[in-house]
């Protein structure tokens, strides 16, 4: 994300701020921008949510349909995650089929949901080997100002928590809430020179050397990890990233539950 050019003056300024323990918007290195969560914003979807982190805004709609299970998992429902990055959200996004950035965004969100076992997919089996519920999570970026991973994941999770399986539309009884196992939260930390900071804004994201996104469950356990960019982390830095994500995931989970 954010591969367009940033001026050397801005780069040096942000690096100097990072080294001094501050950021261009005055936040601490372990502090998120303001977060807002709105649920049920799309009436035609089975579940939906819009999340903003600072000026980054993401809309997620969940659709559920009946379909066939995969042959190797005949008793398990299916999760499919897609992301769309349109020019309306950022001049760096291009129209057309999903590009590498959109595919990576969908993959990181999907990994957090799947490895975190957020959805109890075994309860979405209708007839083993024949019919299961298929959950489509569609991510639409409305405004891009950095840290799409956390905004898209949080919007996906918020949408899933208010999703109902449309059983009545198929003559299969009353609609019922999507069965969930828990609420693992993804948090993203970037490294700028020797400084680690959570929730990177766009300019910070542009000059970051390395990035780690972690999904943390309610017990503080790591459920998924995604490394990004070409830089590296030392063992001590990874330990600090884990600690930062454990603290922040608890705060984000409370915001989600109160929304």
Image (spheres, helix red, strand yellow):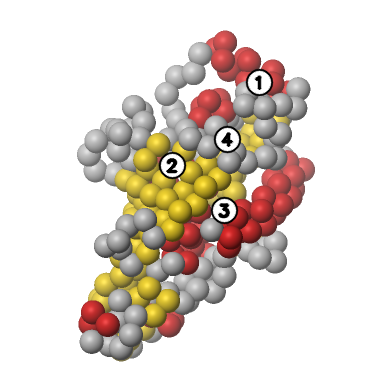
Quick check: marks 2 and 3 in contact, CB under 8 Å?
Answer: no
Q: Which residue was labeled with disc 1?
A: 15
Report x, y in % for residue 163: 40, 69
Marks 4 and 1, how far apart in space? 13 Å
Residue that numbered label 2 is attached to: 57
Where is mark 3, residue-wise? 186
* CA separation in Å, label 4 and label 3: 14 Å
Q: Position of residue 199 (x, y in %)?
A: 59, 39
Query: Which residue, given by chain and number where applicable, does mark 4 sit on?
Result: 200
Q: First in sequence: mark 4 or mark 1?
A: 1
- Location of residue 148 with respect to 170 vertically, above or below: above
Q: Earlier in the sequence, mark 2 or mark 3?
A: 2
Q: Quadrant of the N terminus?
A: top left
* Residue 159 vertical placement versus 228 (above, below): below
Q: Secondary structure at mark 4?
A: loop
Look at the image and tell me whether residue 48 can be seen. Answer: yes
């Amino acid at each position: 994300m954010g591969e367009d050019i940033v001026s050397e003056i801005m780069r040096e300024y942000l690096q100097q701020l990072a080294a001094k323990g501050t950021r261009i918007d005055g936040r601490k290195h372990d502090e998120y921008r303001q977060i807002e969560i709105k649920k049920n914003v799309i009436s035609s979807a089975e579940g939906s949510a819009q999340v903003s982190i600072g000026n980054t805004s993401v809309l997620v709609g969940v659709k559920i349909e009946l379909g066939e299970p995969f042959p190797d998992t005949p008793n398990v429902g299916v999760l499919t995650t897609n992301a769309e990055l349109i020019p309306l959200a950022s001049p760096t996004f291009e129209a057309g089929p999903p590009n590498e950035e959109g595919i990576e965004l969908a993959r990181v969100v999907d990994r957090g949901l799947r490895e975190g076992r957020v959805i109890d997919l075994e309860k979405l089996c209708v007839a083993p080997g024949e019919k299961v519920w298929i959950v489509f999570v569609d991510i639409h970026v409305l405004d891009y100002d950095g840290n799409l991973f956390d905004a898209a994941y949080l919007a996906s999770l918020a949408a899933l928590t208010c999703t109902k399986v449309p059983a009545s539309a198929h003559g299969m009884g009353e609609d019922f809430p999507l069965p969930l196992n828990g609420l693992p939260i993804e948090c993203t930390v970037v490294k700028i020179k020797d400084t680690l900071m959570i929730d990177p804004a766009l300019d910070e994201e542009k000059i970051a050397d390395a990035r780690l996104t972690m999904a943390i469950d309610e017990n503080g356990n790591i459920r998924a990890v995604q490394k990004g960019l070409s830089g590296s982390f030392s063992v001590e830095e990874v330990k600090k990233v884990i600690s930062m994500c454990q603290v922040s995931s608890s705060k984000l989970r409370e915001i989600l539950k109160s929304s």
